[in-house]
Amino acid sequence: MKIVIVGIGGVTNSGKTTLASRLQAALPNSCVIHQDDFFKPQDQIPVGEDGFKRWDVLESLDMKAMLSTVKAWVQNPPKFARSHGVTVQPSASDTHILLLEGFLIYSYKPLLDFYTRRYFLTVPYEESKRRRSTRKYPIPDPPGLFDGHVWPMYQKYKQEMEADGVEVVHLDGMKSPGDLFLQVLEEIQNSLLNCS
């Protein structure tokens, strides 16, 4: 059995979840793990000096639980898939694909060695802010959060990722979702063909 783990990281509202969902629908025997599913309870989210809850820092996520979930998939991808409502297609090649999606997935060092391929979506500041302003979050963004916390944390973690030499394939989040999907799908399919 061949296992492939694809990371889809990047700035807030750059299209990570959309890309991961489309890839999962197109790739047989694939599962998605969303980093957003690992936020700690609201009362455990630290508050900064400016009064904003620090949702966009690694400490706000239960990354040990996310790592355990990834390890559970690695141990038995078909069992993991079935337990998460994904139909395993025995007629497909004996390849199983895990898509890890999130804004800080390359900032947690214990996960770095698991990836077969890492993608990183970017959009300009203005576009990220515009997209975020149109999203409906369970806990709405207070005024000033994007400029005072979200964007600065993205820049901080991106700089750390680059300083640590984490190799990623950069994707332009301004491209249409369809074009991004086709680009990444083709790259994944080609890498699978080249490895078989």
Image (cartoon, rainbow, N blue to C red):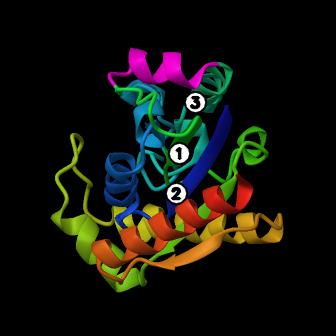
Residue 175, quarter of picture: bottom left
What's the magenta region? 76-85
Picture layout, residue 158 above or below residue 45: below
In the rendered structure, find residue 8 and report the number of the disc placed on it.
Answer: 2
Dots 1, 2 in contact, CB < 8 A: yes
Quarter of the picture holding the N terminus? top right
> Label 3: which residue?
66
Q: Nearer the viewer, residue 31 or 45?
A: 31
Picture layout, residue 119 above or below residue 97: below
Q: Amino acid at mark 3?
A: Met
Q: Amino acid at mark 1?
A: Leu
Q: Amino acid at mark 2?
A: Ile
The percent position of residue 129, horizontal first and vertical second, equals 31, 74
> Label 1: which residue?
100
Disc nearer the start of the sequence (1/3): 3
Q: Tell whether 9 sits left or right of 13.
A: right
Outermost residue on the right side: it is 164
Q: Nearer the viewer, residue 164 or 138?
A: 164
